[in-house]
Image (tube, coloured by chain):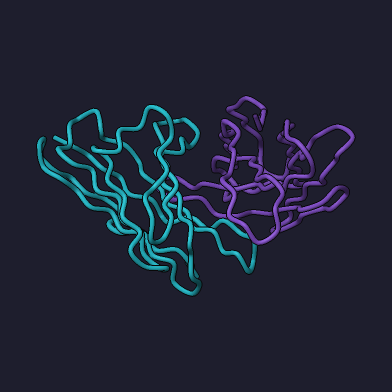
Chain colours: A cyan, B purple
Amino acid sequence: GAVVSQHPSRVICKSGTSVKIECRSLDFQATTMFWYRQFPKKSLMLMATSNEGSKATYEQGVEKDKFLINHASLTLSTLTVTSAHPEDSSFYICSAFDVDRRSFDFGQGTRLTVV
Amino acid sequence: GDSVTQMEGPVTLSEEAFLTINCTYTATGYPSLFWYVQYPGEGLQLLLKATKADDKGSNKGFEATYRKETTSFHLEKGSVQVSDSAVYFCALSPPGPGSARQLTFGSGTQLTVLP
C-alpha cells in the first residue's frame, strides 16, 4: 500500500483564494520531503525541499511567498498555494525520503484547477 | 551538475513486443539509479532501482542494469502488456549514505501498448 499519502487528489478553487495540500508519510519519519510541479506531458519540476523544523529550500524561480511550505512534524509537510491564479493550475506531487530504505516515495498527486 | 537523458517518446508497441527505453546519466561518483512509472492521473511509483555498478534492478518483468562504463541504465521488458501503458521516468540521486538527496529526473517516456 501507499507509504506517502497526499491530499486532496483534486481541487478546484477560485482565483485569489488559497489552497493547502498535505503530504504525509504513513509508516516512516521523513525529515526531508520534496514538492514537485508537473505540466502536461512534461517531467517533474522540483519546486522546493521541505526540511522538518526549518525553512524550506526553494529552487530558482519559485516564489516562496506564493508557495508556502510548512514541515512541522516528521510525518507531515504542507504546500499552500496563496492567492491562486489560473496559471497555477497544475499537477503537484510530493515525495518523502525514507532514510532506512534509502527510497524516495511519492504521493498520489494533486490536480489543482484555478478558475 | 547531474543530469539524466532519456529516450524521447512516445513509444507505441504491440502487446508481447520487446521494450527498451534508453537512459544515460551524467554524475560524479556512483549515484543511485531509479526507474519510476506514472499511470494517468497518478503520482509516481518506484519500478526498480540499482545502487552500485553492475547491479540489476528487476520488478514485474522489467529489468535495468547499472552500467558504469557507459553511464547507462536502460529499461527492458521482454513482453509488454496493455497494462504497461504509462509514462516511465529514469532518475538518479547522488551518493551519500543515510542522507536525503534530491532526485534528478529524465524527461519521461510515454509508452502505449496496443492489444
Q: Which residue is at 31% across, 50% downward?
A: A69
Q: Between residue B106 and residue B115, name the one nearer to us.
A: B106
Question: Which quadrant of the structure image shows residue A89?
Answer: top left
* Position of residue A19 in the picture relative to residue A95 (left or right): left
Q: Residue furthest top?
A: B8
Residue B26 lies, with reference to residue A7, above or below; the image says above
Q: Which residue is at 64% across, 40% downward?
A: B90
* Position of residue A9 in the picture relative to residue B93 (left or right): left
Q: Quadrant of the C terminus of chain A?
A: top left
Q: Position of residue A81 (x, y in %)?
A: 23, 43
Residue A27 lies, with reference to residue A36, above or below; the image says below
Question: Which quadrant of the structure image shows residue B20?
Answer: top right
Q: Between residue A28 and residue B24, name the one nearer to us.
A: A28
Q: Between residue A90 and residue B81, name the one nearer to us.
A: A90
Q: Position of residue B41 (x, y in %)?
A: 39, 46
* Position of residue A92 in the picture relative to residue A49 (left or right): left
Q: How many marks?
A: 0
* Position of residue A66 in the picture relative to residue A32 (left or right): left
Q: Residue furthest front?
A: A54
Q: Position of residue B65 (x, y in %)?
A: 82, 46
Q: Position of residue B59 (x, y in %)?
A: 71, 58
Q: Residue furthest bottom?
A: A27
Q: Which residue is at 65% across, 29% downward?
A: B1
